[in-house]
Every structure is written in structure tokens, then in C-alpha cells.
Amino acid sequence: MAVLRFNALRETLNRKPVEVDEKVKRSVLFGENVFNENTMRQYLTKDAFKGVMNAIEHGTKIDRKIADQVAASMKDWALSKGVTHYTHWFQPLTGATAEKHDAFFETIGNGMAIEKFGGSQLVQQEPDASSFPNGGIRNTFEARGYTAWDPTSPAFIYGTTLSIPTIFVAYTGEALDNKTPLLRALHAVDSAATAVCKYFDKNVKKVTSSLGWEQEYFLIDSALVDSRPDITLTGRTLLGHSPAKGQQLDDHYFGSIPTRALNFMRDLETECMLLGIPVKTRHNEVAPNQFELAPIYEESNLAVDHNSLLMDVMGKVSARHHLKVLFHEKPFAGVNGSGKHNNWSLSTNTGINLLSPGKTPMSNLQFLTFFINTIKAVCDHEALLRAAIASASNDHRLGANEAPPAIISVFIGAQLTKVLNELESVTNGKLSPQEKTDLKLNVVGKIPDVLLDNTDRNRTSPFAFTGNKFEFRAVGSTANCAVPMTILNTIVAKQLKDFKVEVDKLINNKDLKKDEAIFNVLREYIKASKNILFEGNGYSDAWAKEAKKRGLSNNKTTPEALKVNISNKTIALYEEMKVMSKVEVEARHEIELEEYTMRIQIEGRVLGDIARNHVIPTAINYQNTLIKNVTGLKEIFGSSFKKTASDQMELIERISEHISGINTKVEFMINERKKANVLKGQKAAEAYCNKVRPYFDEIRYHCDKLELMIDDEQWPLTKYRELLFTR
Ligand code: ADP
Ligand code: MG
């Protein structure tokens, strides 16, 4: 029975690192396979180039004539690189990416054929997409879905396929993907932020949201992963006793990268360079075989595409190295989990990072405006941000006592806390000349110096200000960043829009000067958002108690957390900011609940199967060996055998107890599943969460105990020690 495990181990131990040839400078490779601005300059006519650039910068429509020209050039470029197929590349609500390849090849009669790709194929496709989740939006009679070209994210070549990033919408116009709402949210934050920027600089025409993600992952030998049905089917181990040595020595973090892993990373980085993904940082993470990869930040839509693409490419490149990438937030119990920090900021077309303090008091007032408005947005919508990162797999991090807690709070550091405290006492209404000077010189004027000293970083905070950006740390490693980015940009857009209205009101009705009005409104925001600011240890019980007093939500499970997504307040927010309609919001909610239910359901099935078909038979086999041993002892020692065989007999009994423990608990779990399966939506998700899932730990407990008792030679499942420490 343990054959699979030992074969896998043997295979792993015999592996040689796959050599990676890296001779060309990375800067030369960068963007080589991307139809980017540089390539477009070479391949497009002047008109076509202008058309595409206008679409990228100002969102103007591309007419059919221009689209035809772009398509023809794209095809020429792709063919020159040996490409045979094209695909619309999109991100349906499965969280993954989707593609359906079509050949350029077309027959034209008389036994002849050509390569063809026109504007209509570039601009729009109609994939048979009835199997993608749609939350009831598409009735079968109008089951069509369209993909439409997103010119703001450049086409790229992967393998021999030209991939064109697209949105995916229903026949009736509703979004069926993650990109569409993101693009709408980015438009909303651009409009709102640009309007606010005009208080400070009339030349600002556009504000762009930036994202720099940090992707954590585990890298495990593929033979070992294949020997574990739980990892193969659910992405995580459902059982397994923790090894004698884990991460307690902290000897992996930032340690020297193992050769096999390093070769994989170099190979991956080359692919990323070709695809224009600007990866920059790589290092070991806290747990054994856990690593992190981070790029230079980019415009949010592009950064989201690049993260989705990267996750796909990582899977393909790792296969070449006989490795598997585990993106799951908690693949191993008792071992550090994986996240995906989302570093976020806003910047203007004039090159100013709005979350970076400037050199003059006025630019610092602009900084404070965006800084405080972001805090206020998070304060007003903390539950929604929690929902943005909710998933069955991320619950293992957020709900449990690890990584950021399920409570959203904002960390800003001691220095900025002091600045906010001072701003809080600004006079109501008109300011005296003395107060203005004082603010200018001593508060607003001092920020840059202050921030340089602000080195304290609270790693327990789910949403931290880190000098020139906010870092949303609670995002899960499997997440599609589009979801948290859509929500964050939407709430900030809404907040900035309200801010503008309030400031204008004070200027027009109360006759305040612009900066007086801004100070007045900011003062009120600081007072109103105190509850969200927290500088202490986010993992502590004391914080959970304090947060409850402050009225912050602490939704430990996905079914709880998701409720806010369909509240009237949320729907009104999305509709006002034109990010999603009520129908779209409700459809997404349904899909997320269903996904949660299915994930737990699958885990339950797999665990039941492994416990009964792998663990119990092994336990019985080993028990039989013991019984034979005891019988033998009885033959030799006669009536006094009980003394000599007492340990074995106790072991036999304990094995029986655990076997029966597993059998009963699996039976109970199956019963709960049956009850849950007749429920729908919220009720089904809650039943799976609260009635089915608790049995996982109980079943696991017995299995893990048996793992410690049974002869290592017979144990069928690759052990934690082997998964985590074999390289
Ligand atoms: P760490 O958070 O691990 O200390 P860094 O602060 O160097 O690491 O940055 C992490 C990520 O933040 C990188 O992807 C980086 O490109 C990104 N980043 C840096 N500045 C910004 C910014 N202004 N907006 C968005 N992301 C940024
Ligand atoms: Mg970070």
C-alpha cells in the first residue's frame, strides 16, 4: 500500500536540478513577446497607433477600420514569431483564466489556405461559455456570452498562441468576469480623484491606480504531490501529523534558496521577462519550501492581468522542473500559510504619487487629503473589504490565529498618528492667520522628514500604510487581485466624491478659502474614522475584544463575511459608482456562496475517502501484525503472556478506538452533508461551514494519531516531513 509513497520519494531523491540557460540580459528580453507601445510603433500605421493610444489613455472607442489595421499588424507580428493560433484571454468568475484557441489558418477554396485575422475577430468573440459561472444571469435561451478586447492590457504571445486580454459579458450586457467591474472601478476612482486633484493642481487630467502584488507559494516535488490525493484534489493536505521540525528555528526565511527552486525561479523569470511581467524580488518565506515573488508595481488592471498570467505560467514552468506550485492559503496545518499582499497607491498623469508626501506644504495637504480619505473609506466599508478577501481557503488564515485577523483595521505608524492628532484640533470654520502659518510650518510642512524615520512596520496589520502606499495584506494567495482591487478603488472613489461635495459646500456656502475648507472636512473625517486605526498586535485576543467594543466586524467564516455583499448599502454604493448593477452584485454573491459550498463539499468527500480507504485498511493491516505478534507471545509464554505483550495489546486497543473514531465521525459527516445538500445559497454554505466542516478536524485527529502509531513502512501517505523537507 505504501508503494506509491516510496516510489514518489525515490523519484524525488533521484531528481537532478534542470539546468537553465540564461545568457541574454533580462532588459533585452523584457516585453519581447508583448504587443506593447514599442512594438505598436513599429507595426501600426500612424492612425492605428493614435487610435489605440487614445483608447488606452482616454477610453475612446476604436472604430472598425482602425481595429482591422491593428488586427492585421498583430497578425503579422505574431506570425513573425511562429505563432499559429489566437485566443481571447479572459477571467471568468472561477477565479482562473480562460482561453479558447483558434487558428489563423483558413481555407479559401481550390485547396488553398491563408492566415487570416480581422478586426472583428480582434474586437469581439462569442465563446460557447454556458459552462462558466453566471449566477443565474444568463437564462439558457440567451446563454451567449461575449468577450471584448481590452486595449488597456496589451496582447501577448505565450507558447505559439497570441493572447488578447478581454472582458467577458453576457448577451444582456452584465459582467460575467472579474475584469469588467475592475475597469469600471478604475474609471470611477480616476474621475473622483482627478476632480479632487484639481484643488491642488489644475493640470491633472488623469489619476491611475497602481498595484504591486507579492505572491507567496509553496514548491513541492510533483511526484510527492501526486502521491497525495488530498493535495491533488483540494490543493491542501487534509491530514498529516506535523513533523518534529517545522519552522520554529526560523532557518528558512530569507535563507539561501535551494538549487532546484532557484532554477525554477530563473526559468520562470525568463518567461516573465518575455511576457513583460516586471518581476524583481524572490526569496524564501517563513515555512520550509515556501517562497515569494514580487514584481515592480504597475497600473492596476495590467498588474491584475499579470498576476493571473503569472499563476498560470508558474504551473507550466514548474512542470518542467518536476515541481508543483501550491497556491493554497494553508496547504499544511501548523505551518505558515500563504498570502498575496496588495500594495496600492494612486498617481497622477503629472507623475505625482498621491500617497507620498511632497516637498511643499500644499503637496503635503494633497497627500493628507488622499491619505485621510482612504482611511475614511476603509472605516466606512471595513466589512466589505473583509468580504473582498473571503474564501474557503483564506478562512484558514483570517479566521484562525495567524496572519492578518478577520478584523480589518488600518496601521499608520506613530508619526502620522501624531499628525492626525494635531489636525484634529483645527478650528471649526475660518482659521486665523496664525493658525494657518502654524499648520503650514509645523504640521503639514514637516511630513517628509517625519516619514523617513517612520520605519516601524506592523506585520500583524491587515491594511498598513508603508511610506508611500497602502498594503492590503489580508488578500489570499489564490485570490484574483481584481476582486480586492475593485472594492478598494470603488470605496475610495465614493469617498473622494463625497469629499469634493463637502469641500465645495464649505467654499460656496460658508465662504471658506479652499485650504480652510479642506482642513475642516479632514478634521471631521479624522474624528469619524478613529475606530479603524489600530497600531497594536492584530493577532492578540485583546484586539478582538477591543474591536468588538469599537463595533468593527469580525467575520471568521466566508458565509458570514459574504453577507454584506448584498446589503442595501453595498448595492447602493456599486450602483452609484457605476461599478455593478444589483443584478450583477446578486449574481456574484450567489456564485461565491456556491463556490464555498462546493469547496467544502469536495474536501469532505476526499477526506472521507482517504480516511476510510487509505488510513483504516492500513491501520487494520498493522493491527493484524500486532495480533500475530501477541498470539506468538502467548504460544511461547503461556499464561504469563499478558505481561510481555501488554504494550502491544494496548496498542491494538488504541488502534481499534481510532478506527472506530474515524468510522463514526465520517458517518456523521456524511449525514450532515446529506442534510446540507438539500439546502441552497446562504443556508447551504452555512450548513457546510458550521455542520460539515467541524468534522474535518475530528477525523483528522484520529488519522494523525494513527500515523504516529503505525509502522512507517506501511503508512500510505507521504508525510509532512517528506513533503516539506525533500528537495
Ligand atoms: P515589502 O512590503 O516586502 O517591504 P516593498 O515595500 O519593497 O516590499 O514593496 C513591495 C511591493 O510594493 C512591490 O511589488 C513594489 O513594486 C510595490 N510598490 C512599491 N511602491 C508602490 C506604489 N507606490 N504603489 C503600489 N505598489 C508599490
Ligand atoms: Mg509586503
Image: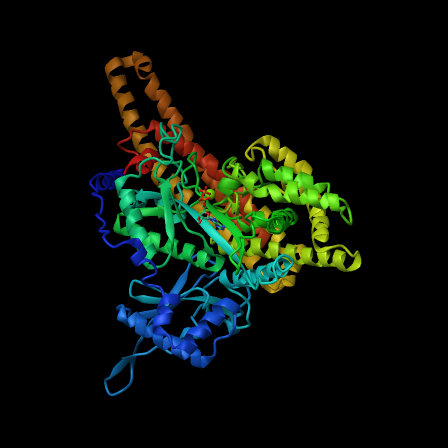
- The image quadrant of residue 114 is bottom left
How many numbered tags mark residues here?
0
Q: How is the image coloured?
A: rainbow
Viewport quadrant of the N terminus: top left
In the picture provided, is 656 more to the left or to the right than 556? left
In percent of width and height, residue 417 lies at 62, 38
The residue sitting at the right extreme is 510
In percent of width and height, residue 112 lies at 24, 84
- The image quadrant of residue 277 is bottom left
The residue sitting at the bottom extreme is 110
Q: 628 or 226, which is in the foreground?
A: 226
Residue at image point 32% right, 66% down: 161
In the picture provided, is 540 more to the left or to the right than 224? right
Q: 727 or 280, which is in the foreground?
A: 280
Q: Against 220, is 349 above or below?
A: below
Residue at image point 60% right, 61% down: 194
In percent of width and height, residue 492 lies at 61, 54
Q: 727 or 83, which is in the foreground?
A: 83
In the picture provided, is 74 more to the left or to the right than 586? left
* Residue 335 shows up from this direction: yes
In percent of width and height, residue 304 lies at 46, 56
Viewport quadrant of the C terminus: top left
Residue at image point 33% right, 74% down: 75
* Residue 479 shows up from this direction: no
Q: 124 or 561, which is in the foreground?
A: 124
